[in-house]
Image: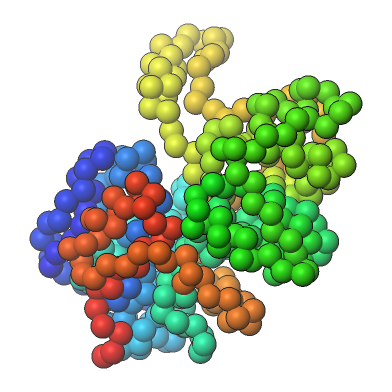
Amino acid sequence: MKALVLKGKGKIAYIDKREPELEALHGALLEPILVSPCTSDVHTIWQGSPKRDDLTLGHEVIARVKAAGELVKDFKPGEIVAVSAITPDWGHPDVDENYAHAGQNFSAHMIGKSIDGAFQSLFYLPFADKNLAHIPDGLSLEDALMCVDVVQTGFTAVEEAGVKSGDTVVVMGIGAIGLAAIMGSRMAGAKKIFAVGSRQDNVRLAESMSDEFCSVEVLNYRDLKCSLPAGMHPLANSTGSPVVNYVLGKTGTKGADCVLLCGGNDLSFPQAVDMVKYGTGVVSNVMYYGADIDVQDEEYVNLVNLKQGEANAVIDAIQIPKFSMGRGMAGKTLKFSLSRGGRENLERVMKEVVKHGWHPSAFITKRYMGLDNIENAIYDMKDRKAIKIAVQLAKPEV
């Protein structure tokens, strides 16, 4: 069968692979119907840590069950299902305590990372009863496709921050995950949302989420001009960002209740710390920080050559501004989260989407047909030619 695989850093290719087999009685074989390349696929290809040879990529997928192990009770061959992008190892003894990192870091991010993903004509998934999800009535397949990763991730940012009724929220980055975080914040009762981004299609979608109960104001960091409110210490804005100045000004210098980091760069984190409220503010991060290979190489060499009692002065890190952290005593909470996943969470999220009459398929601004076009879709995501892309690989009808 044909598969799109990782051949090394920055290299992908189509190769022929043997069809997978049922590896365990709790697993299932799945035929992908709809897939969507993710920015995480881009990170895996161009920035990620080394992966095993010829790993098939892809973790956003709606699929048809082709075969199921004897222990699979809730899903039958022929059924069309949503596949959670976050697929925990439910057999690990630590999974109930910390499913996302049971056994090792990011162990819940198996599909397309440690096991073959969905960019092939048939793929295997373990623990089908806990990693697959039934698609509720009223949700289209494209809506469900957006739920398996970006909506789950955006909602995770909201839930980890504890957004509540009446809150002022800043969403940094309005790609698909940030747009989902805006909607999740609205559903949680936020009264005011500042959405930071600049791409025209994304801005339009963000602004469309504003209503009489929750105002969504987009801040274009590229052309926004705003000074720090009078009387504030200059160090209150460690990066000089006009977005920070604006949010502090609009909140009476108190800052936002929650800042959700869904995109940006290394400066986004100190900016979030600068503009979140003292004492009760929460910064909730679901953004991937790309590694600086040059710094990490130097760090590695230094660590190898360290003598006992010495310390390594080189570290690939994000910065926390000392002033805005109250020199370590500001009472601000920082959270760094992998998206919640698995069947229970995905089914809950899809039901919430149906309940609120929301259609996240609006994120899909480009479509392709066929496995041969997944490579094109990945490059489109890398070059930011779409918010999200849907690629149809098979007909939904049996």
Residue 390 point in image, percent of width and height: 35, 67
Q: Is residue 320 visible?
A: yes
Q: In the displayed orientation, state which residue is furthest to the left.
A: 16
Up the image or down, 68 lies above or below 118; here it is: below
Query: What residue is at 60 percent from the left and 44 percent from the top?
Result: 220
Residue 18 point in image, percent of width and height: 13, 65
Give the position of the C terminus as an image quadrant: bottom left
Up the image or down, 59 lies above or below 7; here it is: below
The one of 6 and 212 positioned closer to us in this rendering: 212
Residue 159 point in image, percent of width and height: 68, 60
Query: What residue is at 64 percent from the left and 38 percent from the top?
Result: 224
Up the image or down, 167 lies above or below 147; here it is: above
The one of 117 and 237 positioned closer to us in this rendering: 237
Relative placement, left or right, of 91 versus 52 is right
The one of 243 and 335 positioned closer to us in this rendering: 243
Residue 327 point in image, percent of width and height: 79, 24
Give the position of the N terminus as an image quadrant: bottom left
In terms of image quadrants, where is residue 352?
bottom right
In terms of image quadrants, where is residue 356?
bottom right
Query: What residue is at 79 percent from the left and 49 percent from the top?
Result: 257
Q: Is residue 130 visible?
A: no
Query: What residue is at 54 percent from the left and 28 percent from the top?
Result: 317
In terms of image quadrants, where is residue 394?
bottom left
Image label count: 0
Q: How is the image coloured?
A: rainbow
